[in-house]
Amino acid sequence: MSETRIENRPSEFGTAEITALSHLYRGELYRSTVWRTRLDTTTNWAVVTTGIALSLTFSSETASPLPLVLVGLLVTTFLSIEARRYRFFDFWRMRAHVLEVYFFGPILDGRGVQLENRWNEILYQDYKTPNLHITYAEAVGRRLRNNYCWIFSIQVTAYVGKLLIHPVPVASLADFWARAAIGPIPGQLVILGGLVFHATWITIAVVTYRSRRGAGRGHPQSPRVDRLLELARGGN
């Protein structure tokens, strides 16, 4: 019956156009997948280098905490690269999502291709004049909240732990400052720089969270019964 509904409804897209859009969707999905894989690559780099820094710092009693300081700068570089990559991933993902919602969705619902909201014209304009849909700061904030906040948390926890208890517990505040010192740089300045460094990331994560895309949009409640799961299990 649903096939009859589709056939009887006039469509501005013929078979050739629908086939072309299907191939277009495959291309957009492929490109979004490629950029998603690139995001995983830079995250893996950040995790591996942080692990190496932890190993070097706690490898011996005389090991310096300097690797944990330097890895923070290296992870920052990876974050900046990943934020740029995320903007392109979001670009391709949004096009694929538009096709899923406005092209495939009505077909699955048995209504045929719907063009009332002119989604096809909007998508055409995006192909004609491409434009990234998320700012660099918002991309940094997203990657911070999703991944890099945990990496930075591990880094700062390990650094403070190194100063306080490795190889022996710190005996006094003066001893703590002495352990934190890096060459001619006093320990107080090193700790202050670390506080400013991490406070900057926390600020970016909070500010971009409040101004994030879709912040005021309501989210549908989770259904009591997962109908798709039941369907996949062979239920009616």
Image (tube, rainbow, N blue to C red):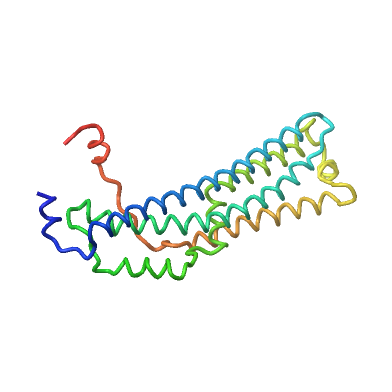
Residue drawn at the location 41% of the way across and 58% of the way down: 94
Residue at the farthest front position: 16
In the image, residue 116 lies at what x, y percent?
23, 68
In the image, residue 140 lies at what x, y percent?
57, 57
Residue at the farthest top position: 60
Q: Nearer the viewer, residue 209 or 127?
A: 127
Residue drawn at the location 31% of the way across and 66% of the way down: 119
In the rendered view, tell whether residue 96 sits above or below residue 222: below
Residue 102 is drawn in which quadrant?
Answer: bottom left
Residue at the farthest right position: 184
Residue drawn at the location 23% of the way across and 41% of the way down: 227
* Left or right, 110 with reference to 146: left
* Left or right, 81 with reference to 184: left
In the image, residue 206 lies at what x, y percent?
55, 58
Total numbered labels placed on residues in the image: 0
* Left or right, 96 with reference to 74: left
In the rendered view, tell whether residue 117 sits above or below residue 195: below
Residue drawn at the location 29% of the way across and 54% of the way down: 19
Residue 229 is drawn in which quadrant?
Answer: top left
Q: Nearer the viewer, residue 47 or 23?
A: 23
The quadrant of the picture occupied by the C terminus is: top left
In the image, residue 42 lies at what x, y percent?
60, 46
